[in-house]
Amino acid sequence: MTGGKSLILGCASTGAKFTPGNHRATGDVLLDQISTGTTIKNSPLALIAEAEALYGMGCRYYHYHARNPRTHEQSTSNDIYQQISRPLQRRCKEMLISFGASRNGPEVREAIARFGEWERISQSSLPLHLGGAHFVTIQAAVELQLMCEVERQYGDVGLDFVDSERFAKIVADYRPSDRLTTTSLETYSTSNGADYGRTSPLIQFEVYRSAVRARQQLGLFHEVEWVQFPRSYAMTRYAVEHPQIRLGGSGQLNVTLLFGFSPRLPFPRSYAEFKQVVDTARKLEYDLAEPGVKKRHVTVTVGAAVLPEQAGQHVAPLDVGARRGRTACALRRLATYAAQPDSGVDVLRFGMEDTPYAVTEAGGGDRGGLLRLADNCELAEIVINELAVNGASVETDHDTIFDRMGLNWVKRNLFHEQRQRPLGRPARPADDRALQSV
């Protein structure tokens, strides 16, 4: 594979919503198999073996949600995260590891009821050498309820509004309320996949702030997922600008765009729609007060988070690339968009978290568009082939990846902080307030 455009290959291996407890049986055998996560690996041995195979195919970014190996449900157990991270670091030495945090399900809700809302995202405070991750998607879907409250107080949050001085004033003036509500988001999901329990904007603010501080103190990296554009952009802009949070304050931020996750971030009908979201994420390199001064290095990861029952709706002709005019499924279209020289994409994400199935292509009299079971390695083959067709390559050089993801920015800023504090005093002492939810 040759060409001017290179992409880091990323696998979202397990995910949060395709579990037995999150799906109500429909009687459609194939659909029920996909939606209950039947083919998603859960045991550490199977996952590490698969990760090694993916590494051999060029994958250098591995996103993982902990799942109970016995029940296949989402888990908050940091021991499960560590059982994946430690051997992955040993066997795939140049793999960047990302932990998910948008966790729900019966076992997650039970753990939060016992230990508080921090339990949902406690993996963000694990040091890398003790089984942590380079990245943790700290902007879990539930944190977006802060922006829902902002909308109730100030009106609809659109792109122009978020880029205005008015929004900068909201960052300074808005105070999250402590009103407890049952949180359910408007998303395309399995039966119970959008239920995030009972919490408040204030609790979510404190959890978000504490997670960012934990990453800063560990010298690790920042990552968020967008699922409700432009509301997700508003939340990230708020976190970047807020003086008590300063998301990406060490100089780096990775934004994962999950196209198709919700009506507010649908799978794009065209390359132009795709580019609008990517370009908006890139604007986070600059603060509202200083639009001409780059404050942080923003990288963009893209994923196709399309439910199996909606897969047929997204089989459509390509409007760009070497196969322009030919029909393709959401995953192939995503890979084609990312492969374009001006896409602005750094990491192309595939995997069982987003599309735990494959879609047949048209050919030989077959109209294509049919679902079938697949695994992460087959999904990797699909996107690699699509990149090759479009003249793009898979980036595997470690130094290039490290620099491209903005990690050198963090390294330089850490050295600067050390020189400013030669006695080792922390820059921002952690707040020890208890974070509790009911």
Image: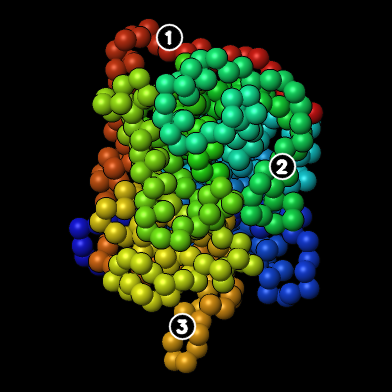
Q: Position of residue 212 (x, y in %)?
A: 50, 26
Between 55 and 195, which is closer to the camera in this rendering?
195
Quote the CA–CA distance across marks 3 and 1: 62 Å
Quarter where residue 117 is shown: top right
| Element type at mark 1 | loop
Q: Position of residue 4 (x, y in %)?
A: 20, 58
Quarter where residue 177 is shown: top right
Which amino acid type corresponds to the residue marked 3 in the rendered image? Answer: Ala
| Element type at mark 2 | strand
Which amino acid type corresponds to the residue marked 2 in the rendered image? Answer: Ser
Between 91 and 154, which is closer to the camera in this rendering?
154
Crowding near pointer 2: few (<14 within 10 Å), some, many (20+)?
Answer: some
Which amino acid type corresponds to the residue marked 1 in the rendered image? Answer: Arg
Task: Tell me if I can see residue 201 in this picture.
Answer: yes
Instruction: Check disc 3 and report the residue beneath it.
Output: 362
Instruction: Check disc 1 and report the residue beneath it.
Output: 425
Quote the CA–CA distance across marks 2 and 1: 41 Å
Give me the disc on residue 184.
2
Crowding near pointer 3: few (<14 within 10 Å), some, many (20+)?
Answer: some
